[in-house]
Image: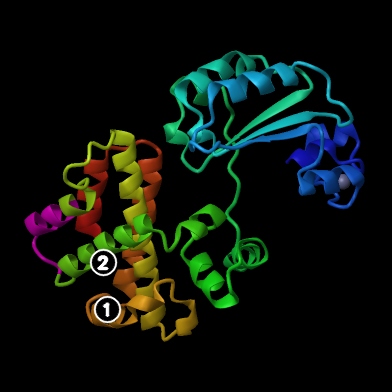
Amino acid sequence: MAQMLNCEALTAARADAAVSADACGVCGACLRIARGVHVDVIVIEPGETGAIRVDMVRAVVGQAAFRPFEGRRRVVIFDDADRLVPAAQNALLKTLEEPPSASVFLLVTSRPHLLLPTVRSRCPELRFGGLRPEEIADILVARHQFNATTALAAAASADGSVARALETGSDDHLQARQSAAALLRSLAAAPNPKRRLETGKDLAGARRGSRASAAAARETLIGRLRALATLLRDLQLLSAQADRAWLANADLEAELIELGQFYDTDRAGRGFASVQRAVDALTRNASPKVVVDWLALQI
Ligand SMILES: [Zn+2]
């Protein structure tokens, strides 16, 4: 998008109309933006503390008040905008309401519900499509020292996101997967509704002793559901006799084969669709309890 706003091959009028206009990708501006060295495209990322601090926001808001140096538009990209601390979000409010005419602010996040409502209400939402697994695998190999096989496996379970692919293999992900596998085992023999709801509770339950905030508990649950989706997808692949190289959880193959006796193509497919709906509902702020109760009756 920063390239589209500054591409030298697009006239300002066409770029602003954004009618099937895309950046050329090869002009000087496009190349400098891709290399991260264009003076008018500023990327703000979390610092060492994992947060975007208020002083980082103040500095860039000050800068954005001036005309761009060489481009048509100054583009300020907050990558992982959900890491903006509340004070930093508040410092942005006035600018988001009346942005300087030559500046565009992009708040990029896969977790918009973690932003303050006052920030969200000032931002039109643009949805970016996910990357295809092959595209993610290429990025993992080129920039993150993955070998081709691991890259494909990580990409297969990443739901279109490079960041999510990088999380695969982290402790959080492995724990999420354990919880998800436990749910599938408990529900395998299609128990009665009461037992199902209890199983759902196990999935939603925060770890004992943790004083996680509601937002963190929601994140944990979403992580578990994403892991659950990859298991159900693998079950579909197994029952379709697909190439094992595409299993996202190849290390759990033995357990998946066992579960496959209970989850045929249909059941795994319906389960997968239900999990996607559940994740969607959670990212739109639905009640975790309601979502989990519903889901436990669907799988
Ligand atoms: Zn260009």
Q: Earlier in the sequence, mark 2 or mark 1?
A: 2
**Front-most of 100 and 64?**
64
Q: CA distance from mark 2 to mark 1?
A: 9 Å
- Residue that badge 2 annotates: 181
Q: Residues within 10 Å of mark 2 (few under 14, many from 20)?
A: many
Location of residue 105 in the rendering, given as x and y in whole percent from the top left corner? 66, 28
Location of residue 14 in the rendering, given as x and y in whole percent from the top left corner? 86, 36
Residue type at tag 1 = Glu
In the rendered structure, which segment of residues is drawn in magenta? Answer: 190-200
Quadrant of the rendered structure where residue 100 is?
top right
Q: Is mark 2 within 8 Å of ligand 1?
A: no
- Horizontally, residue 157 falls left or right of residue 35, namely left
Q: Which numbered circle lies on residue 255?
A: 1
Above/below status of 6 relative to 159? above
- Horizontally, residue 215 falls left or right of residue 158, namely left
Q: Secondary structure at mark 1?
A: helix
Q: Residues within 10 Å of mark 1 (few under 14, many from 20)?
A: few
Above/below status of 77 relative to 182? above
**Color scheme of the displayed model:** rainbow
Q: How many marks?
A: 2
Q: At 8% across and 58% down in the image, what residue appears?
A: 195
Q: Is residue 135 visible?
A: yes
Q: Secondary structure at mark 2?
A: helix
